[in-house]
Image: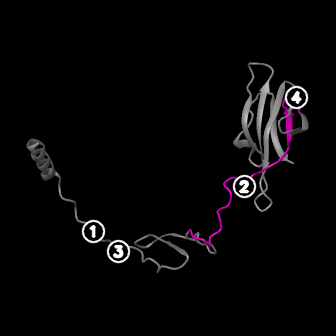
């Protein structure tokens, strides 16, 4: 134990002292205002946008937080299917839990949701898409109506997009 303490003391003795800090003049900081987020101690960190307020501290008069999932379920998905070779477009309306066939594709709608009226309009559908030919790709996941490139069927011949839910 004594050897370990001697080693630790010798190691501490070899650590150089920190260099002194040099104060350089910088731009003057604006005085704190109610529109600035304050760090627990020190100057403002991030300017707040006008009109934005910090959330109230939890207490008996604070309403409950909004639900974590603001999407609302719907019973039918509106889809557009495209045959890239023949340039053929077909509009499909498929009930949740049902399937539709588009040439070699089988499209099963597992869920369809929309945003509430007080939020930006959007729709999403959870789709299982399979090709009857085993060498062709399929798709399993959510597709967004307003962001089709975020999650899409990567098929050489067909394209499927969600246009809405009702």
Q: Residue at x 78, y 47 (%)?
A: 113
Tell me where residue 152 appears, x and y as whole percent: 73, 37
Q: To which residue does mark 3 refer?
A: 25
**Which label is found at residue 70?**
2
The outermost residue toward the front is: 60
Q: Could you tell whether 156 is left or right of 60 in the image?
A: right
Label 2, label 4: how many angstroms apart (C-alpha)? 31 Å
Label 1, label 3: how many angstroms apart (C-alpha)? 10 Å
In the image, which is nearer the foreground, mark 2 or mark 4?
2
Q: Main secondary structure of the magenta part?
A: loop
Q: Residue at x 74, y 19 (%)?
A: 135
Q: How packed is label 3: few (under 14 Cα within 10 Å), some, or many (20 or more)? A: few
Q: Element under label 2?
A: loop
Mark 4 and mark 1 lie on one chain; the one further toward the N terminus is: 1
Q: Residue at x 56, y 68 (%)?
A: 58
Q: To which residue does mark 1 refer?
A: 22
Tell me where residue 74 appears, x and y as whole percent: 83, 47
Q: Are marks 1 and 3 in contact (CB under 8 Å)?
A: no
**Residue 77 colored magenta?**
yes
Q: Element under label 4?
A: strand
Magenta range is 58-87
User: In the rendered view, would you say 166 is above or below 129?
Assistant: below
């Amino acid at each position: 134990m004594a050897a370990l303490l001697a080693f630790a003391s010798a190691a501490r003795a070899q650590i150089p002292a920190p260099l002194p800090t040099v104060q350089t003049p910088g731009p003057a900081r604006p005085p704190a205002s109610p529109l600035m987020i304050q760090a627990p101690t020190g100057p403002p960190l991030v300017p707040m946008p006008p009109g934005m307020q910090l959330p109230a501290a939890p207490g008996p008069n604070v309403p409950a937080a909004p639900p974590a999932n603001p999407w609302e379920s719907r019973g039918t998905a509106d889809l557009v299917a495209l045959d890239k070779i023949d340039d053929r477009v077909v509009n499909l309306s498929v009930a949740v839990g049902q399937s539709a066939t588009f040439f070699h594709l089988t499209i099963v709608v597992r869920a369809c949701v929309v945003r509430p009226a007080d939020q930006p309009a959007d729709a999403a559908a959870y789709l299982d898409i399979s090709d009857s030919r085993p060498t062709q790709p399929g798709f399993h996941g959510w597709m967004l109506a307003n962001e089709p490139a975020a999650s899409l069927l990567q098929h050489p011949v067909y394209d499927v997009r969600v246009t809405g839910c009702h």
